[in-house]
Amino acid sequence: MSGLSIGRVGLVLGLFLVISYALCVGYGLLVPEQFRMHTAWQALLPGFTWLSPASFLLGLVESFAYGFYISVVFVPIYNKLGKVSRG
């Protein structure tokens, strides 16, 4: 059995975070101010401000990059531990 692929896992995690980000921004546009998550996005995504088209695009790019970064760290660890446990 082969290990996980950094590229494949990165793509999946990146798209997952992009979809989650877009849904949260959409939710923020529909609800009153006190229920928005823009303060969390401003802390997690450097350069993000609520809400301009450039900031939204930057958030999409950064969300995807975070997902890919997680795969770069996670997949080698997972693959190495998988080899150790199989012997």
Image: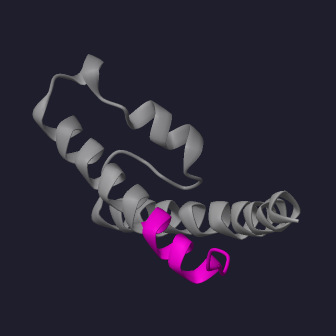
> How many tags in the picture?
0
Render colour scheme: one colour
Q: Nearer the viewer, residue 69 or 24?
A: 69
At a point 51% along the width and 41% down the height, the residue shown is 42
Q: Nearer the viewer, residue 44 or 84?
A: 84
Q: Quadrant of residue 17?
A: bottom left
| x and y, in percent, of residue 33 in the image | 24, 23
Q: Quadrant of residue 38?
A: top left
Q: Nearer the viewer, residue 23 or 45?
A: 23
Q: Is residue 87 magenta?
A: no
| x and y, in percent, of residue 76 in the image | 78, 69
Q: Residue furthest top?
A: 34
Q: Residue furthest left?
A: 30
Q: Is residue 8 shown above or below 32?
A: below
At a point 14% along the width and 27% down the height, the residue shown is 31
Q: Is residue 13 magenta?
A: yes
Q: Is residue 86 shown above or below 3?
A: above
Describe residue 87's horizontal placement relative to residue 54 as left or right: right
Q: Is residue 15 shown above or below 52?
A: below
At a point 40% along the width and 64% down the height, the residue shown is 60
Q: Quadrant of the C terminus?
A: bottom right
Q: Is residue 81 shown above or below 6?
A: above
| x and y, in percent, of residue 79 in the image | 75, 68
Q: Quadrant of the N terminus?
A: bottom right
User: Which range of residues does the magenta coloring cover?
Assistant: 1-14
| x and y, in percent, of residue 21 in the image | 35, 51
Describe residue 61's horizontal placement relative to residue 82 as left or right: left
Describe residue 47's horizontal placement relative to residue 53 as left or right: right
At a point 19% along the width and 38% down the height, the residue shown is 27
Q: Residue furthest front?
A: 87
